[in-house]
Image (cartoon, rainbow, N blue to C red):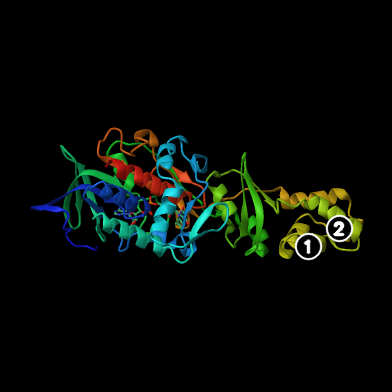
Amino acid sequence: MEKKTPDLIKETGLQRKSDVIVIGAGAAGMMAAIRAGKRGRSVLVLDHARAPGEKIRISGGGRCNFTNIHAGPKNFLSANPHFCKSALARFTPADFIAMVERHRIAWHEKTLGQLFCDDSAKDIIRMLLDEMRAVGAVLQLGTDISAVERLETGFRVSTGDGVYEAASVIVATGGKSIPKMGATGFAYRLAEQFGLAVLETRPALVPLTLDPGLLASIAPLAGISAPAEIRHGKTAFREALLFTHRGLSGPAILQISSYWREGDEIVLAIEPDIDIAAQLKRAKQLNGRQSAQTALGEILPKRLAQFLVEREKISGNMADLADKALLRLAASAQNFAVKPSGSEGYRTAEVTLGGIDTAALDSRSMEAKGVPGLYFIGECVDVTGWLGGYNFQWAWASGFAAGECA
Ligand code: FDA
């Protein structure tokens, strides 16, 4: 399927024509190509990368968390929280699971409704390529796009390999996260070229960094992971928290990073299912000669217990400590306010928050309201999922919606 003049594309001089051109062979673009191809449309998929679905390949630690069985509008951030409803309702996690099962890909639920491949994320890429092949969609890799212009009917796409024409163009070039993997701002620039608004973009599902003073103080905690509830205003996530040598990470932090803004405080509640204050009081009664550090070290990782005891300047035996001191120690673990200094940015962010304003798109088809035949899908649109398979579900659903209409 690589870099040849596609048989399906009619050659008329320099201008090769198809019904649909999809720009971007990622999750959303491949799904759109499959759906449009199934409807009998001739489809050409162009991508500047050397391989399709590179983000799928590295996703979910190489096993691709391909959907979440609980995915619904509440799991997405957008200036218009209603926009994603129509597409999500018309291509559901069950629809994607059915495709995965048709291709005999073994999968399992890890936690919180997150579905992963048993073997490899490459199985998902293979499945999508097989589906594309089955409907005659043609994939052309290593193709740089230099311009997209509107014609009287349809569009002209100029590339390093010549000029292509199509009645519809579906833009599926993703967001800005991980530029090292070929992420570009292409979709945003194209949207602006056609007069669509682009909302502020920022890295999301990203580790948070700390100022040097705080970082130095928590340096001994690097590598420690613990169950936690991380709160930002009224939003809270309960998953693992990881202290790193750059700051804070782990699923709970990545989730809250989509809500956090510079200058905001977040609150860490470590081991939220344990009443640490009650356990410390009980330890004082049962074993008063134990040190506070030892008692806390039976509840939390030992290095974390040591850090908290030192931070609260608590020393001596449990029997000598007032209940007030024990409450203070418990609060330091379960009401630990931190003001991150920033995030690790697009270098490590899993997704881009913000993007093409959904007000400019039809929520049923993803078509630009003022530009018939032009569609935007996937991560470039201002719809961003939580961590846990939601972003792929949006890619599949928005791709399906566009492929159904283009
Ligand atoms: P995507 O980025 O997948 O594809 C865009 C395509 O367009 C690429 O093939 C790219 O080469 C191409 N392109 C870009 N610019 C171009 C240009 N100028 N010209 C031509 N082609 C261009 N989500 C999830 O639900 N479960 C998970 O397990 C994970 N795990 C994960 C791990 C890591 C490390 C990252 C970075 C991200 C995830 N995600 C995730 C998020 C998920 O990968 C992301 O939401 C989807 O890949 C978005 O799909 P799109 O098709 O919109 O863009």
Q: Residues within 10 Å of mark 2 (few under 14, many from 20)?
A: many
How far across and how far down the image is residue 297, in percent?
A: 77, 62
Amino acid type indicated by mark 1: Glu
- Mark closer to the chain start, 1 or 2: 2
Amino acid type indicated by mark 2: Ala
The image's mark for residue 265 is: none
Q: In which quadrant is the N terminus drawn?
A: bottom left
Q: Nearer the viewer, residue 124 or 312?
A: 124
Q: Nearer the viewer, residue 247 or 275?
A: 275
The image's mark for residue 283 is: 2
Picture residue at 39% right of the left edge, 57% below the top: 102
Picture residue at 16% right of the left edge, 59% below the top: 5
Classify mark 2: helix, strand or loop: helix
Q: Nearer the viewer, residue 157 or 98?
A: 98
Q: In which quadrant is the C terminus drawn?
A: top left
Q: Residues within 10 Å of mark 1 (few under 14, many from 20)?
A: few
Picture residue at 30% right of the left edge, 51% below the top: 34
Picture residue at 18% right of the left edge, 62% below the top: 4
Residue 358 sits above or below residue 182 on the image: above
In this rendering, the count of numbered labels is 2
Quarter-of-image position of residue 382: top left
Distance from disc 1 to disc 2, alpha carbons, whole Å, reads 10 Å
Q: Which residue is mark 1?
A: 298
Is residue 180 visible to the viewer in this orientation of the structure? Answer: no
How far across and how far down the image is residue 56, in percent?
A: 41, 59
Instruction: Please report contact status of discs 1 and 2: CB closer than 8 Å, yes or no.
Output: yes
The picture quadrant for ligand 1 comes to: bottom left
Classify mark 1: helix, strand or loop: loop
Quarter-of-image position of residue 377: top left
Q: Is mark 2 within 8 Å of ligand 1?
A: no
